[in-house]
Image (cartoon, grey):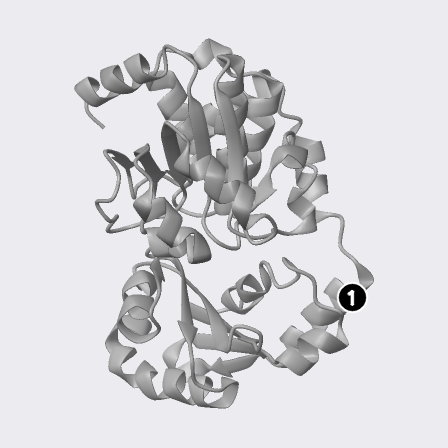
Amino acid sequence: MTKREISEIKTLLKSPKKVVIVPHKNPDGDAMGSTLGLYHYLKMFNHNAIVIAPNDYPEFLKWLPGDESVLKYDSDKTKADQLILSSDIIFTLDFNALNRTGDMEGVLTNTEAIKILIDHHQQPDSYAKYIYSDVSMCSTCQMIYHFIDMLGDIKAINANISTCLYTGIMTDTGSFRFRSTTSTTHRVIANLIDNGANNAQIHNNVYDTNSYNKLQLLGCGLNNLKLISNLNTAHITLSQKELNTHDYKKGDTEGIVNYALSLKGVKFAVIFIENQSEGIIKISLRSKGNFDVNRFAREHFNGGGHINAAGGRSELSLEKTVEKFISILPTYTNDLKS
């Protein structure tokens, strides 16, 4: 984002505006942390701001400050459409194409509001007037921190903003262990702690509040773990029946794929999750080193993301999707063995 663009945005925000802040569908910690962090910042300057999420998100994020103000589009479409169509500015955070918002895509496309995109995924679409895109960033939450800094308001970051941004950085870096975590990330984190983020409590709220059924589902997934040792690959499946048996709640499968990636020698890990209500198989892909799961997901499973973390989908059955995946793998033999 250029100095001229930042100057224009500063001018735009000098007087109170009607602002809508939108995360992607099925928002995760980075999506909700960045939207709520920006929400608290804008409210400090008397903007009429609201976060409108396309749909619900996991319970382990509902303690975030400002959660009670979030409007879910799929629960209150009429009100949400009115707010979007009457807004002056729309921030779209943690996604790079409007189709990532599901049913909100139409109204977001048609609104005349000024759009500002802030995101760290590859190949952003050009729907926004202002685009702050940086694929080297570990999270959109870190980008919101830098965005506030660029606006000259770093001293405005308070405990609520710090808590939200810390949460998104923590979750999108796998508790600061992914290689996208830089020295700058740690300096940002230090400042967030200094400004009120309770790191121990945040970690506890996100990771240490598991239900019995969630842990049983994890056990089921690990029981389904398959290793393709000659290609340094592991995969996990969870059928709709298995999800139902363990009373699946949104967010219960978060992080399971990382257990497959933790296997000694594994370079590529995937989890396939059946979703009968949407008629798809949801796919999460993770890798180590230089194996590009963003490219793999884009080329084969209508998805995308980052080099080491991506998502995709399949309209085949669970069994056929896994068969397709296994049939594709030999094409990448050199990459997976190197």
Residue 217 location, x and y as percent?
71, 70
Q: Nearer the viewer, residue 87 or 203?
A: 87
Compared to residue 318, the image places residue 39 above or below, namely above
Residue 10 location, x and y as percent?
31, 15
Look at 56% across and 24% down and name the residue there: 162
Q: Nearer the viewer, residue 247 or 8?
A: 8
Compared to residue 145, the image places residue 58 above or below, namely below
Q: Nearer the viewer, residue 173 or 297?
A: 297
The image quarter containing residue 29 is top right
Residue 54 location, x and y as percent?
51, 50
Residue 257 location, x and y as percent?
54, 66
Q: Amino acid at mark 1?
A: Asn
Q: Secondary structure at mark 1?
A: helix
Quadrant for the N terminus in the image? top left
Q: Seen from this angle, which residue lies furthest right?
A: 212
Work out whether residue 175 can be spotted. no
Which residue was labeled with disc 1? Answer: 213
The image quarter containing residue 329 is bottom left
